Image: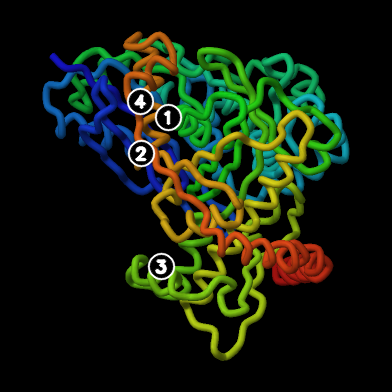
Amino acid sequence: MALGLIGLDCGTQSIRALLIDAGGRTLALATRPTPTIARASDQAEHAPEVLWETVLALLSEIAEAAPGMEIAGIACASMGEACVLLDAADRPLGNAITWFDRRSEPDAAMLAATIGAERLFAITGMPVDPTLTLCKLLWHRRTDPVHFARVRRVLNLADYIAFRLTGAAATDRSLASRTLLLDIAAGDWSVELAGRVGIDPRLLPPLRPSGASLGPVRAAVLTATGIAGRPVVGVGGHDHVVGGFAAGAARPGILLDSIGTAEALLQTVDRPVLTAASSARGFWQGTVALDRPFAYVGAGLNRAGGAIEWLAALLGAPKREALLAAAAAVPIGSRGVLFLPHLAYATAPVVDPAARGAFLGLTAATDAAALFRALLEGLAMEARLAVDALAALPGAGAAEEIRVIGGGARNALLLAIKAACYARPLSVIEVPEATALGAALLGGIAARLWPDMPAALAALRLPARAVEPDPGAVDAYAGLFTDIYRRVYPTLRPLNHALAAFDAAAAGGSE
């Protein structure tokens, strides 16, 4: 009987379950919206039990789509930072606040003031960012200390799903790197940081390599979903990183451009780049344990695909294809309109939580097509800022190749603009569900279908296509980027900080 593998991808907008065979052929895909409870524009939560029920429903759909197929392995990838708090009976203690939730900003400020951004970076390789897991834990403790005193286990979303599948708790280093609690050089939880903030390190799960076996799926789950066989569950990882596994980006010299709701630009390196330059520019650092240990240094946009969805909704566009076609007909430079994509503050190479987005150059003649193209151009030029800064970073350097995955990889106009802005070809990995595929491969490694990720990728031979930059567009975007775009953020910075202060004061006065 043919064996199947299931990859789960728990993302900001949707949760996906992908079924493949041992040759990497897609047999079934089930998708449902990620259940999210909105509290405010920048505040939202996930109910852990509802997330789990959604996963069970997706697994049931997969079982129905391939009746009788024995599943050999399963693994899950997820967004980082968000975490589930469990009590002594392993029951969720309330909701998990989403990765993009801003309620933990005071806690991030407290960490910077008491421990210091330099010391935090030296240990974790991360800038102080309110989205990171430690800030969320401190928010929970600050706002409900009695509730927090009952916490006995802290799990990232991918780890929570794997825990519900198997009863075994563990995390990988790519997710641990997003907690602000990992000693990146030692590859273990930082006892120093946990002690200084009063977090018991025993709350954190054991660290295991991605693809390590957690054990078989519990019988009750198999009965509830109808999945056949006795699948083994593998340790998963951070969604962007796991998508990079499927894209073959787990070797030095590759820059992964993973475009989803957020965009991650991750350059694979042999070891962390813990330099003053990387600290000053706010670059992320992370480590990964796969068939061998390696690291990444990166940056990204908190709203990329999310910005596209935001503008399309504001414009009331009934069909995205029509809006993209109209934007493609607009000349380079969007008829003098420029977009600064800081909808959820600015990240590396200039970290600024008070930054705000902007459209510049509007006239009475500006139409929806020009706005939409300007947004795509702004996303591409903001990404180029990070790519250029990474290339100049000692220990990273210019990437040999840029590989693109994610939902944004299906946006032909965005890719053409990006290639021209980067002035480099893009290698687009033509796998619609790269993250779910990467997770499925980790499930296959856990089930010992392959000894390691290189062997799995060799068996799959995934297709890729090149997006070459248009020479004329390269010159035009070089001028727009150099002469105008790079000047926009520093010019607007004092005004945006004043607006942020005014907004905070107005909100405080209305309470």
Left or right: 47 with respect to 365? left
User: Distance between the Cα atoms at labels 3 and 2?
Assistant: 21 Å
Residue, x 63% and y 58% (percent of image)? 381
Residue, x 50% and y 39% (percent of image)? 403
Q: Which of the pair 492/399 is nearer the observer?
A: 399
Q: Along the polypeptide, which appears first: circle 4 or circle 3?
A: 3
What residue is shown with label 2?
Answer: 431
Q: Residues within 10 Å of mark 2 (few under 14, many from 20)?
A: many
From the top left corner, tell me how far across and down residue 225 is, in percent.
22, 28
Q: For residue 337, what is the image quadrant?
A: bottom right
**Farthest-out residue, front:** 471
User: Distance between the Cα atoms at labels 3 and 1?
Assistant: 28 Å
User: Distance between the Cα atoms at labels 4 and 2?
Assistant: 13 Å
From the top left corner, tell me how far across and down residue 406 is, in percent.
44, 44
From the top left corner, tell me how far across and down residue 259 is, in percent.
50, 47
Q: As shown in the figure, which amino acid type bears the numbered disc 4? A: Ala
What residue is shown with label 3?
Answer: 324
Q: Which of the pair 426/177 is nearer the observer?
A: 426
Q: As shown in the figure, which amino acid type bears the numbered disc 1? A: Ala
Q: As shown in the figure, which amino acid type bears the numbered disc 3? A: Leu
Q: Secondary structure at mark 3?
A: helix
Marks 2 and 1: CB-CB under 8 Å?
yes
Q: For residue 147, what is the image quadrant?
A: top right
Q: As shown in the figure, which amino acid type bears the numbered disc 2? A: Val
Which of the labelled discs sits on residue 246, or is there none? 1
What residue is shown with label 4?
Answer: 440
Q: Residues within 10 Å of mark 3 (few under 14, many from 20)?
A: some
Mark 1 or 4: the one toward you: 1
